Amino acid sequence: MNYKDLFENNHNIAVVGMSANPSKAAHSVPMFISEQGYKIIPVNPSIDEINGFKSYRNLSEIPDNIDIVNVFRPSKDAEIVVEEAIERHKNKVDIKIIWLQEGIFTENGKKLADENGILYIENICMYKAYISK
């Protein structure tokens, strides 16, 4: 996988499950990516704002285009997020990549994403991929 091309061509990243807790990877990874010049869009229904970024309840509420959906949710919830991303992709034709963080897997996510023309990455930390590019 050529991460350099992925990062050069995709700048708006919706982070499903982003945390306001600085000690969690679901906070530190997106904040690092933001510091590299990417637009981070938190998706967390229990928080209105994270570090000055407006947080949305779900992907469909986000008015901006989304290039990557980065998922920080337990594996048992990840397929629901994949389905939501695919539904948004069908309506807005904007999501190009669904990226499940390290340790997160789905049973059918790759098949669903492939069927809808979306690149699917799972069990890979976006921070580690970024620094290795």
Image: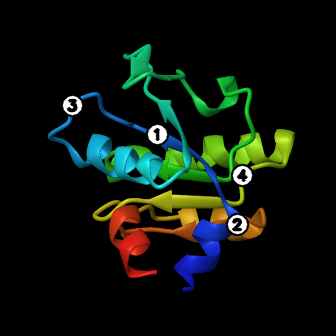
Which is in the foreground here, disc 1 or disc 2?
A: 2
Distance from label 1 to label 4 (Cα)? Answer: 13 Å
Q: Nearer the viewer, residue 2 or 16?
A: 2
Q: Which residue is mark 1?
A: 16
Q: Of the residues under marks 3 and 1, which one precedes in the sequence?
A: 1
- Residue farthest to the bottom, as pictured: 1
Residue type for callout 3: Asn
Q: Could you tell me if the residues under marks 1 and 2 are in contact, i.e. CB atoms within 8 Å?
A: no
How dense is the environment of label 1, judged by Cα within 10 Å: few (below 14), some, or many (20 and up)?
A: many
Q: Is residue 71 visible?
A: no
Q: Could you tell me if the residues under marks 2 and 3 are in contact, i.e. CB atoms within 8 Å?
A: no
In the image, residue 41 sits, relative to residue 29, either above or below, namely above
| Residue 56, horizontal then vertical, whole percent | 54, 22
Distance from label 2 to label 4 (Cα)? Answer: 12 Å
| Residue 71, horizontal then vertical, whole percent | 44, 49
Distance from label 2 to label 3 (Cα)? Answer: 29 Å
Q: Which residue is mark 3?
A: 21
Q: Of the residues under marks 2 and 4, which one precedes in the sequence?
A: 2
How dense is the environment of label 3, judged by Cα within 10 Å: few (below 14), some, or many (20 and up)?
A: few
Q: Of the residues under marks 2 and 3, which one precedes in the sequence?
A: 2
Which is in the foreground here, disc 2 or disc 3?
A: 2
What numbered label is drawn on residue 95?
Answer: 4
In the image, residue 40 sits, relative to residue 38, either above or below, namely above
Mark 4 secondary-structure assignment: loop
Residue in the image at 37% along x and 26% along y: 51
Q: Which residue is mark 2?
A: 9
